[in-house]
Amino acid sequence: NIFTFEPGQSLPVVETHVMEHGLYFLQGKGLYYLDGQWMEVEKDDFIWMGPYCPQSFYATGPVASKYLYYKNVNRDIVI
């Protein structure tokens, strides 16, 4: 999936997922929330997130922020 956020837009919640996943930042910049901490991100940054890691995003740049988001939803997870 490619997520696009205009400047000032954000994910409306802090979320978690049961599987590890990653993202590759394609354009713009912003603040990414991971496990209780906000960090600056920009084009060409890569983030890998472990399972159940709280996360969110806020676009801060002068242009739209875009990132490629990957998670393997076709795995069986024992609960």
Image: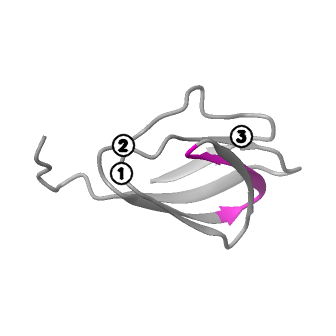
Magenta-span inclusion, residue 28? yes
Q: Given contact means CB atoms under 8 Å apart, are the residues at marks 3 and 2 in contact? A: no
Within 10 Å of the Cα at label 2, are there few (<14), some (14-19), or many (20+) other Cα atoms? Answer: some
Question: Position of 33 compared to 15: left or right?
Answer: right
* Magenta part of the chain: 26-35
x and y percent of residue 53 in the render?
Answer: 45, 46
Tag 1 residue: 51
Three-letter code for the amino acid on which mark 3 is drawn: Tyr
Tell which residue pokes out farthest to the right in this image: 62
Tag 3 residue: 58
Instruction: Specify the color scheme.
Output: one colour
- Give the distance between the C-alpha atoms of the residues marked 3 and 1, in whole angstroms: 21 Å
Tag 2 or tag 1, which sits nearer the N-term? Answer: 2
Tag 2 or tag 3, which sits nearer the N-term? Answer: 2
Q: What residue is drawn where x is 72% and y is 53%? A: 39
Q: What secondary structure prevails in the magenta region?
A: strand
Three-letter code for the amino acid on which mark 2 is drawn: His
Tag 2 residue: 17
